Amino acid sequence: MTGQMTGMKLRLATLLTALVSAAVLGAALLSQFVGGLQPCVLCLYQRWPYVATIALGLAGFSLAKRHPGAARIMLALAGLVFLVGAGIAGFHVGVEQGWWQGTSGCGAPTGGAMTLEQLRAQVLAAPVVRCDEVPWSLFGISMAGYNFLVSLALAGAALWAAARRTQDGDEA
């Protein structure tokens, strides 16, 4: 039926939210641990929305059969979290392009150095991963740029699915 969503489609939408989020997060982890691309602090921040949307998708999946309205709320929240992720990724793209400056953690070591000697040892031991350098790109688009596009697409899909009604007329 056009414009309506069955309970099965709602369960599928919530499960897909979790699975696609896990796939994107897995790709980021593979690029780090297999591909050797060390993340900067903004790269790490971009991962947290996917952790949240995995949890929201799984919660929505478990609620979809008995509480479709609650499942749609989970989808809507996931859509909003994807928009936050797009914002973080967009900010990172701006840092890469030199449109604005990154956070204080971009390229600077963080941690519990209490003395100048401890700070010196920490700086020498830690690889500096700058937020304004692009370690990998495809067709001129960095990983942050692709994350921006993917996050926007996922936000649109989740919000669209959350807005659809089930066949029994239940609304979020």
Image (tube, helix red, strand yellow):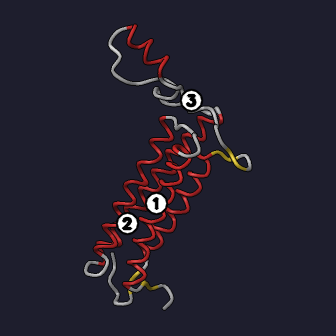
Task: Say which amino acid is labelled 3.
Answer: Arg
Task: Say which amino acid is labelled 2.
Answer: Gly
The image shows residue 135, relative to residue 126, as above or below, that is: below
Q: Quadrant of residue 115?
A: top left
The image shows residue 14, relative to residue 130, as above or below, that is: below
Alpha carbons under labels 1 and 3: distance apart = 25 Å
Query: Which residue is tagged 1?
Result: 21
Q: Residue at x 34, y 60 (%)?
A: 55
Q: Residue at x 48, y 30 (%)?
A: 103
Q: Marks 1 and 2: CB-CB under 8 Å?
A: yes
Residue 140 x, y percent position in the rendering: 73, 46
Upstream in sequence: badge 1 or badge 3 = 1
Task: Say which amino acid is labelled 1.
Answer: Ser
Q: Relative to residue 129, is residue 168 drawn left or right?
A: left
The image shows residue 18, relative to residue 101, as above or below, that is: below
Secondary structure at badge 2 equals: helix
Q: Marks 1 and 3: CB-CB under 8 Å?
A: no
Q: Quadrant of residue 5?
A: bottom left
User: Which label was assigned to residue 117?
Assistant: none
Secondary structure at badge 1 equals: helix
User: Which label was assigned to residue 130?
Assistant: 3
Residue nearest the viewer, comparing 136 with 14: 136
User: Which label was assigned to residue 57?
Assistant: 2
Residue 14 x, y percent position in the rendering: 40, 71
Residue nearest the viewer, comparing 67 with 108: 108
Secondary structure at badge 3 equals: loop
Upstream in sequence: badge 3 or badge 2 = 2
Residue 62 x, y percent position in the rendering: 29, 73
